[in-house]
Amino acid sequence: MAISRPGKYVWIDGELVPWDQATVHVTKLGWSTMGAVFEGISAYWNPEQEQLYGLQFAEHYARFLNSMKLMRMETRFSVGDLVQASIDLLRAEEVREDVRVRPLAYHSEGTWFGTLLDSPTSIVISVAPFTSGLGTGQRLRACVSSWDRISDNQLSPRIKCISNYQNSRMALIEATLRGYDQPIILNSQGKVTEGPASCLFIVRNGVAITPSITSGILESITRQSILQICREVLGIPTQEREIDRTELYIADEVFFCGTGAEIRSVVSVDDYVIGSGEIGPITSAIESYYHDIVRGRENRYAHWRVAIYSRVEQTA
Ligand code: PMP
């Protein structure tokens, strides 16, 4: 059954709450120092196997707890608890399509200004439909943003704090108004960082190159997975290093990656055509292998997936 809009439940602090009752009083949102962190997680439906695969749930919740820790938010829930909560929610929703699982931790007794340390933290998890772009041949036109990426000593881009996404939003709005699909954001040293909600790879002379984890990027799970797939399966050499702006323009291939972005080819940057202007062979090989992993067709990285429906339930 397709998940309805709205869904049936929201998981809130250990309970599956009916959708209509999952409300918050407007004054609890806080005001000038609203504090929240979030995650973006995917689950893919495999129609042949009649199975829903949660992707890298434990990795996402480990990062979620790191985001909370950095923002000094307390919680009684462990990675294991939150993985189980997500499984319970997907089962309760009877999901049989690709979806996003969306956890948010926020100060639930919002304060008006100040430390927020006196406000308790709530965790809510909801599910939303997701349209995968894998295998659809999408090609993006990107531009270099005029906005700098926030840095580790300002608001750390390493974590998923909602405030960071105002920086992403400014860059995305600017790119959209200029007629591009996505911006590529540079750090204040002028080096390439990432997209507004994805990491970035370039390919030069057969080497897949991505900015290092200290260049002002999110600690991306997909970036790490791609580095692993390149090294362990596809035999593609990799480098994690600074990337200059002009390397974007003369790269053979450029692609964004992320749990939501998946693997998305960039065919021009600032109107410089990348390679032949088509999806490159390395981007294509990575995308196709990644697609097989997430849909449960490739078992080398089966430990990245959690099967939501057990065999007993499937046959019942
Ligand atoms: N950078 C940013 C700013 C993001 O929001 C995302 C999406 N979570 C990514 C990179 C990709 O991270 P991941 O591979 O963990 O989804």
Image: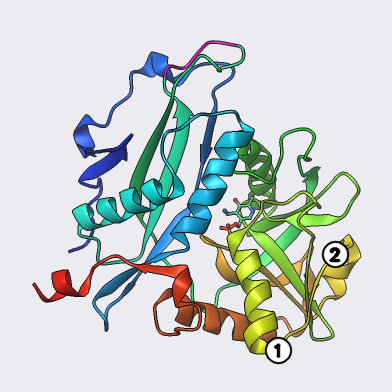
Most extreme residue toward the left is: 316
- Mark 2: which secondary structure? loop
Q: Which residue is mark 1?
A: 235
Q: Amino acid at mark 2?
A: Arg
Residue drawn 20% across and 75% down? 311
Picture quadrant of residue 194:
bottom right
Q: Main secondary structure of the magenta part?
A: loop
- Mark 1: which secondary structure? loop
Asked if residue 111 is among those painted magenta in the image, a careful observer would answer yes
The magenta region covers 109-113
**Residue 299, position in %: x, y?**
45, 83
Q: Position of 57 compared to 258: left or right?
A: left
Q: Position of 305 compared to 276: left or right?
A: left
Residue drawn 70% across and 81% down? 231
| Mark carried by residue 241 | 2
Q: Amino acid at mark 1?
A: Gly
